[in-house]
Amino acid sequence: KIKNDRLLYGMNPHMHFRGKRMSFELRLPDGTIQPLLSVPNYNFNWQRSYRLKEPLRIPAGSEVIIRNAWDNSALNPHNPDPSKEITWGEQSFEEMFFATMTYVDMD
């Protein structure tokens, strides 16, 4: 859970060639779910950081939920080798689930 109120400025989803989709959501202290970012057709070549037009205030007690999916099938045209067992790694022929958020704590 987030300990202090925050101002959120942006998000960065990152996976490699098997990345399929990623989303960021916020669970507010009252249980309400607020979508923050949805990348339903992730593409490694896009490598984007998403900046909000206006900073978003996130209250203390909120939780950030980040979900993703990979496609290691032969139907994925970007998959370097669908027959290979995949592990985490920094190389693009391996796979990664990495997400960052740009924010400032409000004290």
Image (cartoon, rainbow, N blue to C red):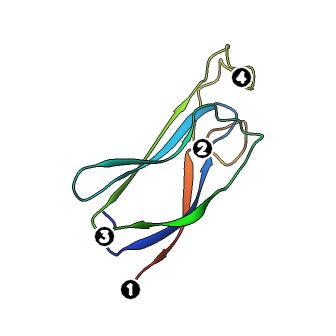
Residue placed under numbered mark 4 in the picture: 81
Residue situated furthest bottom in the rendering: 107
* SS class, disc 3: loop
Contact, mark 3 vs mark 4 (Cβ under 8 Å): no
Is 87 placed left or right of 107 in the picture? right
- Would you place residue 10 above or below residue 35 in this image? below
Instruction: Give percent across and percent down for residue 12.
Output: 61, 54
- How far apart marks 3 and 1 lie (CA) works out to 11 Å
Residue placed under numbered mark 3 in the picture: 60
Marked residue nearer the N-terminal end (3 or 2): 3
- How far apart marks 1 and 4 lie (CA) works out to 48 Å
Is 46 placed left or right of 95 in the picture? right
Is 52 placed left or right of 106 in the picture? right
Instruction: Give percent across and percent down for residue 48.
Output: 71, 50
Quadrant into which the N terminus falls:
bottom left
Instruction: Give percent across and percent down for residue 100.
Output: 56, 59
Category of crowding for the residue at label 2, using alpha-carbon neighbours closer than 10 angstroms: few (below 14), some (14–19), many (at least 20)? many
Residue 11 location, quadrant: bottom right
Q: Amino acid at mark 1?
A: Asp
- Would you place residue 45 above or below residue 7 in this image? above
- Would you place residue 22 above or below residue 55 in this image? above
Residue placed under numbered mark 2 in the picture: 96
Residue sitting at 65 percent across and 35 percent down? 42
Residue placed under numbered mark 1 in the picture: 107
Quadrant into which the C terminus falls:
bottom left
Marked residue nearer the N-terminal end (4 or 2): 4
Contact, mark 1 vs mark 2 (Cβ under 8 Å): no
Q: Amino acid at mark 4?
A: Asp
Q: Nearer the viewer, mark 1 or mark 4?
A: 1
